[in-house]
Image (tube, rainbow, N blue to C red):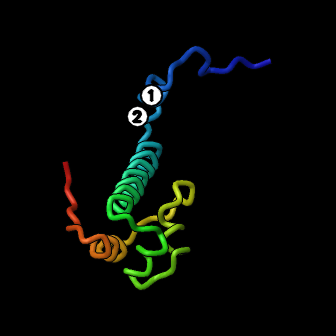
Amino acid sequence: MRKNPHMGENFRTYLKRELKNPAYRREYELARARLKLQIKIQEAAKRKNLSIRQLAKRMGTSGTQIQRLLDTKSGKDFRLGTLVGISQALGKELVIDFR
C-alpha cells in the first residue's frame, strides 16, 4: 500500500507548498476573489433587506441568474458590467483596487 505523501502535514504547510506552482496559484487566487465578491454581495443585499429576487428585479434580470453568480460552487466569473449593475442595484459605489 502506498503511503499518503501529505500525511501529518497541516493545511497551511500544504497550501504554501502548492502555491509555488503558478497554475495552482492562479486558480486559487481566482477562486478566492470570486468567493470574496460573492460574500460581499450577499452581505450588502442582506444589509439592504433585499432578497436575491428583489436584487435581480432592480437589475432587470432573473433571480436564477443572480443565484448562479452567488453560488459558491458554480465557478461562474463576474463580468464588469454585471458588477456595475449589482452595485447600482445595491446603491453602492463599485471600487476596484490592486494591492
| Image location of residue 15, percent across then percent down | 46, 31
Q: Identify the disc placed on residue 65.
A: none
Q: Residue furthest bottom?
A: 60
Residue 16 against residue 87 in the figure, above or below: above
Residue at left offset 47%, top offset 69%: 52
- Cα separation between marks 2 and 1: 6 Å
The reply, left or right, for residue 59 in relation to residue 72 is left
- Residue 96, position as x, y percentages in the image: 22, 61
Q: Residue 17 carries which label?
A: 1
Which amino acid type is marked by label 1? Arg
Observer-nearest of 44 and 98? 44
User: In which quadrant is the N terminus drawn?
Assistant: top right
Check the image and report above or below for 39 versus 4.
Answer: below
Image coords of residue 58 (percent x, y): 37, 80
Q: Pointer 2: what residue?
A: 20
Residue type beneath disc 2: Lys
Q: What is the crowding at mark 2: few (fewer than 14 residues within 10 Å), some, or many (at least 20)?
A: few
In the picture shown, does residue 17 fall above or below 70?
A: above
